[in-house]
Amino acid sequence: MMAVAEKSPARAARAVLLFGLAVMTAAVVWWFAYYSQYQGLNFLGHKFACLSGEAMECSFYQDQIGSSVLPAYSPMLLWAGTVVALVGLYLTRRNKA
């Protein structure tokens, strides 16, 4: 018989944290790939506000990019990853106590 590895809550908490961080990383890569289509790395400071969806210039940049192979960036992926990462961080801290 093979021994089944015991599932630890600390290991599951780390997995949730890492999944949230991976989702956030994917959102940043998507943001960079999408907004770099307009003027490359120029205006990167202005485009940075589009990462969280707070800038009014985002619609201007999206209009300038027009139809693209990439879908238009949405900050929902970043916020979802942030929530999952915070839950994972809370669970990690709780299991250490």
Image (cartoon, rainbow, N blue to C red):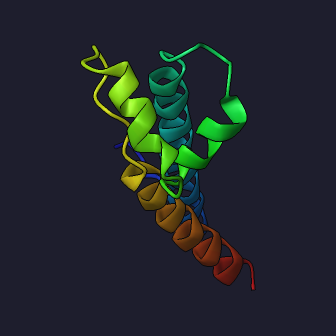
Instruction: Looking at this view, name the residue that lies furthest to the right.
Output: 97
Q: Can residue 63 be seen in this view?
A: yes
Residue 22 coordinates in the image, percent (x, y): 53, 42
**Which residue is depicted at the point 50% across and 33% down?**
31
Query: Which is more toward the observer, 87 or 74?
Result: 74
Instruction: Looking at this view, name the residue that lies furthest to the left.
Output: 67
**Which residue is depicted at the point 28% across and 16% down?**
68
Residue 25 coordinates in the image, percent (x, y): 56, 39
Indicate whether 67 appears above or below 48.
above
Q: In which quarter of the image is the N terminus?
A: top left
Q: Is residue 7 visible?
A: no
Q: In which quarter of the image is residue 96?
A: bottom right
**Which residue is depicted at the point 68% across and 30% down?**
44
Indicate whether 72 appears above or below 74.
above
Residue 77 coordinates in the image, percent (x, y): 40, 50
Q: Quadrant of the C terminus?
A: bottom right
Q: In which quarter of the image is residue 8?
A: bottom right
**Which residue is depicted at the point 52% across and 58% down?**
54
Query: Which is more toward the observer, 8 or 43?
Result: 43
How many marks the image carries: the answer is 0
Residue 81 coordinates in the image, percent (x, y): 48, 55
